[in-house]
Amino acid sequence: MNIVWLPRDERVNPCHQVSAHLTIAVFPDLQRKQSIRILPELYYDDPKEAEIALIPLVEDTCSEAIAKFPEVLHGLVKYVTTNKLRALHKGINPVELTIYLFLPVEFLGYSLKYWCSESSKLATSYPVVVGCSDRFNPDRDDSWRLHNQLKKGWERLSKSATALRQVKWIQPDESFNGDLERYAGLQCFGHWLKSGEKYLDRWEKLVESGIPLALWMCEVEADREAIAQTFNSLTDCNVSEFLQRVRQERRQPSISVANSGYHLGVFYEDPNYVPTVPPQDEDEPFFSWPQ
């Protein structure tokens, strides 16, 4: 497979550390029930290089049963860390790998243990965050608009403050039904963001707003003060440090769940590291699903 070299943007890696970003886009499989299409790609960013490498990991989207996704995910992480990164990285500095799972909006509220498997250590070994694949879904007429909303949201986040704690956050209560588009981040202290069909309209509202960062707690019964302490610790840093704070928090013992790696939900979309979509031909759709 060909490696694509992207022009360097100094915003991408302000700490000058070697970083890698594994993006895995999940799309509905229109041909097979209970199956998904998967598109994995790897960004490799070494500050000593003039450009950033974007490496496709499959020739085209591949179809798998949803139940097999944890197996696929672990296989991809192993392949990237033992094969691709070993071949790319020749320096003495360590590589920081982040895993982005881009999911359809109806899956965003699912706990990471659904995608990684309950016994997995991925969430404590790497920063694992979720984003919305609808922004890049070639079968959606509104995908470009949703992607454009993300760019606007990231601009709000980037310009608002140096420390994430100081950005314009919305902390919605159960009755909130206002406009999210003017905010840079969302913190859920209660049940505004949860899994389940009854909360789908809220996830859609979050994606529509373009807010690139949202935090919530999964399967944890903690008071507001304890959750606020966790969120404050996570956001007492700049954007470049945030992902490692996520990993550190998931390694901490949790109050009320045995596997602490899954107590924290993080929605985080950096438009510098997102799935690519093949260009649209004038007479054809982006691409058609294999028969």
Image (cartoon, rainbow, N blue to C red):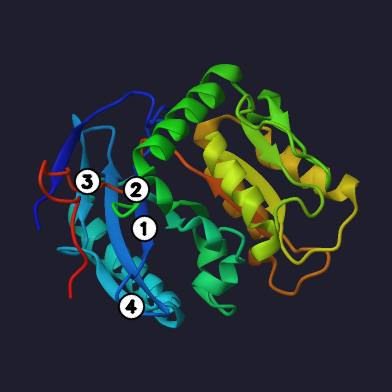
**Mark 2 lies on residue:** 136
- Mark-to-mark CA distance, 4 and 1: 13 Å
Which of the 4 quarters of the picture holds residue 218?
A: bottom right
Q: On the rendered structure, is 72 left or right of 107?
A: left
Residue at 58%, 72% in the rendered image: 113
Q: Mark 2: which amino acid?
A: Phe
- Mark-to-mark CA distance, 2 and 3: 16 Å
Q: Earlier in the sequence, mark 1 or mark 3?
A: 1
Q: Mark 1: which amino acid?
A: Ala
Q: Position of residue 32 (x, y in %)?
A: 33, 79
Of 231 and 48, nearer the camera is 231
Q: Earlier in the sequence, mark 2 or mark 3?
A: 3
- Secondary element at image label 3: strand
Q: Evaluate whether residue 232 shows in this view.
A: yes
Circle on res. 64: 4
Closer mark to the observer between disc 2 and disc 1: 2
Q: Are marks 2 and 4 in contact (CB under 8 Å)?
A: no
Q: Residues within 10 Å of mark 2 (few under 14, many from 20)?
A: many
Vertical placement of 241 versus 140: above or below?
Answer: above
Q: Earlier in the sequence, mark 2 or mark 4?
A: 4
Q: Earlier in the sequence, mark 3 or mark 4?
A: 3
Residue at 25%, 45% in the rendered image: 91
Q: Mark 3: which amino acid?
A: Leu
Q: Mark 4: which amino acid?
A: Glu
Q: Position of residue 201 (x, y in %)?
A: 64, 51
- Mark-to-mark CA distance, 2 and 1: 8 Å
**Mark 3 lies on residue:** 54
Residue at 39%, 70% in the rendered image: 73
Residue at 9%, 52% in the rendered image: 2
The quadrant the C terminus occupies is bottom left
Q: Residues within 10 Å of mark 3 (few under 14, many from 20)?
A: many
